[in-house]
Image (cartoon, rainbow, N blue to C red):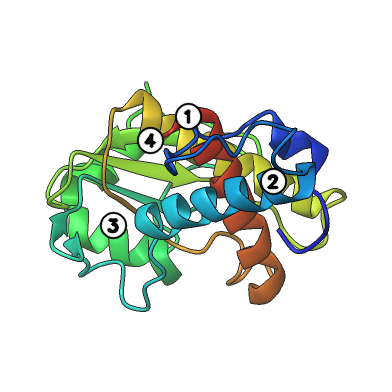
Amino acid sequence: HFKAQRDLELRFLALPTRDRGWDWTDRRRTCVELQEFLQSKDERTQFDEAVKILQGDIGYINDIEGRPLDGIAFPTNSHLTNHYVGAAQAVFRRAGRGLHDHVNDPSFRGRRPTGSAVATPAFDAGVKKLIHCVGPRITMPNCFELLATTYENAMSAVLHEELTCVTIASISTGNMGVPCDEAAQVALRTIQKFLRANHW
């Protein structure tokens, strides 16, 4: 955190405390600010261990620092079909014909609302599951809230599918027009909250 005290909404999503050999949670020994600083330090360490920022083609990423991927989350359109551009095109190419047939099957087809994240089989993608993420356009009201919801739903799908190593392509930063810097802040903040709430 970058101020005297942590955001109120994050205080209730704290990770278990680490043993430091002394009771740093005793308010007679340490002030609230020091306690929150130490807790933030622990959370930063856990975040750095759990989250890695990569640059590359999602169509070819197979592992993260030697850990094999078991899931890929990527931005797509509201029908979850291949629109032949960006990360969706790379994932559809990687997954093969089976994914195309699956999303176009009448029993599966349909429009998903903005903010949705839908898990499907991965077919030939070399992972267990694909998570299709319907992000917002920059012109939508509450765009950044919807973007946070999209990441929340993607991470909920990760948890539900019991995935342990997932690559997530940047959502809404291509044709949807969301500036990369602002989208990254939303993504990392949402994932940070997810890690605190679920200890994933």
Disc 1, SS: helix
| 10 Å crowding of disc 2: few (<14), some (14-19), many (20+) | some
Residue lying at 13% horizontally and 63% vertically, measured from the top left: 66
Tag in front: 2 or 4 = 2
Residue lying at 22% horizontally and 67% vertically, measured from the top left: 61
| Residue 125 can be seen in this image | yes
| 10 Å crowding of disc 4: few (<14), some (14-19), many (20+) | many
Tag in front: 2 or 3 = 2
Q: Nearer the viewer, residue 43 or 109?
A: 43
Which of the numbered marks, if any, corresponds to residue 158? 4
Tag in front: 1 or 4 = 1
Estimate the spatial distance between the alpha carbons at disc 2 and disc 3, rounded to whole Å. 44 Å
Estimate the spatial distance between the alpha carbons at disc 2 and disc 1, rounded to whole Å. 19 Å
Asked if the residues shown at circle 2 and circle 4 are in contact, with their CB atoms under 8 angstroms apart, the answer is: no
Q: Quadrant of residue 146?
A: top right
Task: From the image, tell me which residue sits under label 3.
Answer: 92
Task: From the image, tell me which residue sits under label 1.
Answer: 198
Task: From the image, tell me which residue sits under label 2.
Answer: 36
Estimate the spatial distance between the alpha carbons at disc 1 and disc 4, rounded to whole Å. 11 Å
Counting from the top left corner in percent of width and height, residue 4 is at 83, 56
| 10 Å crowding of disc 3: few (<14), some (14-19), many (20+) | many
Estimate the spatial distance between the alpha carbons at disc 4 and disc 3, rounded to whole Å. 19 Å
Disc 4, SS: helix
Estimate the spatial distance between the alpha carbons at disc 2 and disc 4, rounded to whole Å. 29 Å
For the image shown, how many numbered marks are present on the structure?
A: 4
Q: Is residue 146 left or right of residue 54?
A: right
The amino acid marked with disc number 4 is: Val
Mark closest to the chain's N terminus, 2 or 1 = 2
Mark closest to the chain's N terminus, 2 or 4 = 2
